[in-house]
Amino acid sequence: MRYRTIFFILILFTFSCSSRSISDPTQAKDCTELVEAGKAVAERVLERLDGQTLEELEAANPDEPLAPIDYLMRVEEFENQAAVLGCGKDQLRLQACSVYADLEVKASGDLARDFLAPYLESCS
């Protein structure tokens, strides 16, 4: 499913804690800051999805129900910055659960929980 793929890509490029707060992936100077940017994006996505269902998103935009989420995700920017910084997918995946675990309480509704699932799968 495209939805899960997009969110899994984001998690691959985000992990760990940062010494400074950052929300723009293009401003990240290391993998740690890239993770902070990813967490900020994930929080915005959860706010956008708050209590919504996929059916509601499809009703609002049948052709591209995830367009508002895709816009927030900035996947290409994360991918590019991860490549520039040399952030490895395995490294990011291993540390993802420690960074995103607290987001689980912010997930309201099935769609939001589905969004977080790839992040939390790294914890198993």
Image (spheres, rainbow, N blue to C red):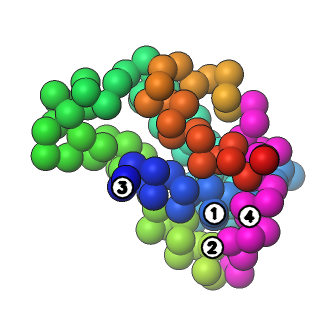
Query: Seen from this angle, which residue lies furthest right?
Result: 19
The residue to which callout 1 is attached is 12
For the residue labelled by badge 4, is the local secondary structure a helix, a strand or a loop?
helix
Q: Is residue 64 magenta?
A: no
Mark 3 or 4: in front is 3
- Secondary structure at numbered mark 3: helix
Q: Name the residue under label 2.
A: 82
Q: Can residue 92 be seen in this view?
A: yes
Whether pointer 2 and pointer 4 mark residues with C-beta atoms closer than 8 Å, the reply is yes
Q: Report if the CB atoms under discs 1 and 4 are less than 8 Å apart.
A: yes
Q: Which amino acid does label 3 sit on?
A: Arg
Residue type at tag 2? Ala
* Amino acid on which the number 4 mark rests in the picture: Leu
The quadrant in which residue 103 appears is top right
Tell me which numbered mark, 1 or 4, is placed earlier along the sequence: 1
Taking the spot 16% from the left edge, 37% from the top edge, the residue there is: 61
Q: What stretch is highlighted in magenta?
A: 85-102
Q: Nearer the viewer, mark 1 or mark 3?
A: 3
- Pointer 2 and pointer 1: residues touching (CB < 8 Å)? yes
Q: Is residue 13 above or below residue 104?
A: below
Give the CA separation, mark 2 to mark 1. Answer: 9 Å
